[in-house]
Image (spheres, rainbow, N blue to C red):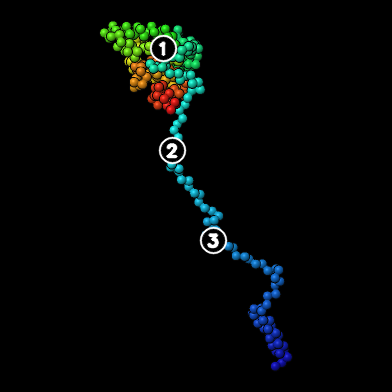
């Protein structure tokens, strides 16, 4: 073998040695410990942890034992508006209303007068010309009207005793008339007198009555002597007779189909 071939053989052998050493894994890791990056495994919360950190809001069970509150019965600020005058309750001795003119010769207590004027104005705007035919009445005036009614029934053939009983159903005996309070008024529409010469139950057929019945409470008035309450009020049905008690009390009475006696019984329980 010549020198040139020997040189090439030695060079090739030297190149094989480092390649074989790189194929082996190092026995020792010489990377400094402080430079080692350790990736911690991410812990997922266990089911018990999730339940402890979050829970469904508990639904409140209704208290079945609690009874619903009964609606409060409204009362007027001025309790004098609830004065009761009927066959069993006389006007208090010395009672004097503070009168104010409402229409023509008819007066009411100032507590009711302006509301009555507002009611008449609203009716007129709705197309009904309402006319008062009675308002405040003295005890003396009631005595005259009652005596006249008694004589009328005597003329029909009633005994004096029976005539007084029947007359009292239409005209309250002196001292027992709501008109003494200055809080009550009788009224009908102007066209009523074209058909009748006296107050009759038939007034309920008039559209003006229907309007009054539906709207009177908005102005603090009630239909004082309803058809189905005659045994309670002691007075026959009067579709023309309205009594002022204040807006809140009037609304409650009319909405619940009460008469004043029933309302007073409720608030005094």
Name of the residue lying farthest toward the left:
157
Q: Which residue is mark 2?
A: 67
Q: Is residue 20 left or right of residue 139?
A: right
Question: How many marks can you see?
Answer: 3
Q: Nearer the viewer, residue 264 or 212?
A: 264
Q: Is residue 68 left or right of residue 200?
A: right
Residue 183 in the image: x percent, y percent? Answer: 45, 15
> In what element is the residue under mark 3?
loop
Dot placed on the residue nearer the N-terminal end, 3 or 1: 3
Front label number (3 vs 1) = 1
> Residue at position x 43%, y 42% from top?
64
Residue 243, by quadrant, is top left
> In what element is the residue under mark 1?
loop
Residue 86 in the image: x percent, y percent? Answer: 39, 16
Dot placed on the residue nearer the N-terminal end, 1 or 2: 2
- The label shown at residue 175 is 1
Q: Nearer the viewer, residue 80 or 28?
A: 80
Q: Which residue is mark 3?
A: 46
Q: Residues within 10 Å of mark 3 (few under 14, many from 20)?
A: few
> In what element is the residue under mark 2?
loop
């Amino acid at each position: 073998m010549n020198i040139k071939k020997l040189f090439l053989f030695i060079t090739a052998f030297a190149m094989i040695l480092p390649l074989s050493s790189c194929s082996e894994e190092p026995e020792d890791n010489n990377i400094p410990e402080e430079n080692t990056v350790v990736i911690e495994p991410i812990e997922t919360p266990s089911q018990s942890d999730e339940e402890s950190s979050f829970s469904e809001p508990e639904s409140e069970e209704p208290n079945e034992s609690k009874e619903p509150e009964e609606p409060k019965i409204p009362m007027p600020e001025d309790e004098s508006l609830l004065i009761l005058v009927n066959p069993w309750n006389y006007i208090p001795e010395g009672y004097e209303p503070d009168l104010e003119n409402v229409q023509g010769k008819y007066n009411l207590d100032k507590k009711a007068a302006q509301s009555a004027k507002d009611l008449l104005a609203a009716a007129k705007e709705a197309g009904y010309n309402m006319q008062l035919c009675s308002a405040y009445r003295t005890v003396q005036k009631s005595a005259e009207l009652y005596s006249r009614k008694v004589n009328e029934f005597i003329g029909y053939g009633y005994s004096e005793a029976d005539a007084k009983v029947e007359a009292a159903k239409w005209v309250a005996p002196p001292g027992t008339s709501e008109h003494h309070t200055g809080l009550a008024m009788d009224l009908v529409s102007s066209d009523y007198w074209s058909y009748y010469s006296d107050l009759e139950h038939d007034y309920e057929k008039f559209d003006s009555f229907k309007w009054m019945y539906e709207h009177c409470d908005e102005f603090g008035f009630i239909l004082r002597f309803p058809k189905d309450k005659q045994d309670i009020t002691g007075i026959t049905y009067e579709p023309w007779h309205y009594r002022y008690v204040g807006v809140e009390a009037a609304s409650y009475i009319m909405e619940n189909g009460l008469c004043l006696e029933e309302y007073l019984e409720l608030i005094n329980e």
